[in-house]
Amino acid sequence: MEHLARLARGGEKLVNFVAMILVLLLMLYAGYSLYDNWLISQAGFGSELMKYKPDAEKTYSFEELIARNPDVVAWLTIDDTHIDYPVVQGKDDAEYLNKDALGEFSLSGSLFLSCLNAPDFSDPYSLIYGHHMDNGGMFGDITNFLKESYFEGHRKGTLRNTDHTWTIELFSVVKTDAAASEVYSIYTWKESNAGLKSWLKEESLYYRDAGLSENDAIIGLSTCYDTETNGRVIVFGKLELQEVKDSE
């Protein structure tokens, strides 16, 4: 009996030791998960990239970013939102889903221009994609445009590359799905966006007159709608060229 009792005490110690190890592992995993989520959250805001942002006085820092990654085509800013990032263009529309604008791995990805668009935004319709981050990073603020008060209070943005500056006049928000050919079939509007303009007047959740002329280019900003598997929210704006630099 005493032998059995010793075995029982030894088994109890072993069970306690294993339980302690499991608790420590769970604590380490929980700590790692919190740290990982924090890293993803911080990456979504791209603070390290802000030093490359072009402004009216200088573009050399932006040119340094392009030198580091030639896939960078522009810098997009939407006033009074978190949207203030470089825009890249990959060989396909999957390349920058999990890479930042320096070409390094990042779960928050990048803002990227459709691979079917001209990189100089000369198409009648250009489409930029971005992840929906719950903290408002990347295109997380796009879904805020589903609220009419937010749509009415956010009307302007800026798009810059090394040669041009465009103002963006936001005029439409659409809630649809990934199969919406009017939004995602870029080649449909390669020659003219007249049909897209008509479609937006009919299908927009909110729409305002932006004085669109026949030759005005349109830009779309697309992100996932997190309550629906294939849901998408797209904000549309009119591109208006503001500045052309003299070539040397």
Image (tube, grey):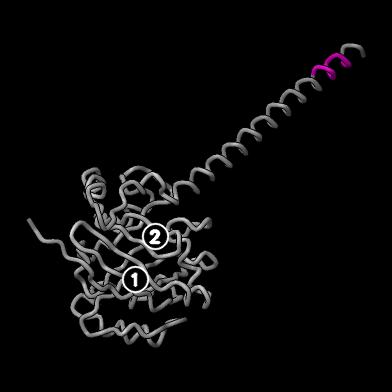
| Residue 206 percent location from the top left of the image | 46, 81
> Magenta segment range?
4-10
At 18% from the left and 78% from the top, the residue drawn is 191
Q: Which amino acid does label 2 sit on?
A: Gly
Question: Which structural element holds mark 1?
Answer: strand
Instruction: Determine if the magenta segment contains residue 242.
Output: no
Residue at the farthest left position: 248
x, y (%) of residue 230? 46, 68
Rendered image quadrant of residue 222: bottom left
Along the line of sight, which residue is nearer the eye, 97 or 46?
Answer: 46
- Name the quarter where the C terminus is drawn: bottom left
Q: In which quarter of the image is residue 239?
A: bottom left
**What is the number of the mark on residue 130?**
2
Amino acid type at image mark 1? Gly
**Residue 108 picture location, percent across and down:** 43, 51
Task: Decide which of tag 1 and tag 2 comes sooner along the chain.
Answer: 2
The residue to which callout 1 is attached is 220
What secondary structure is the stretch in magenta mostly built from? helix
Q: Is 153 placed left or right of 77 in the picture? A: right
Q: Is residue 6 magenta?
A: yes
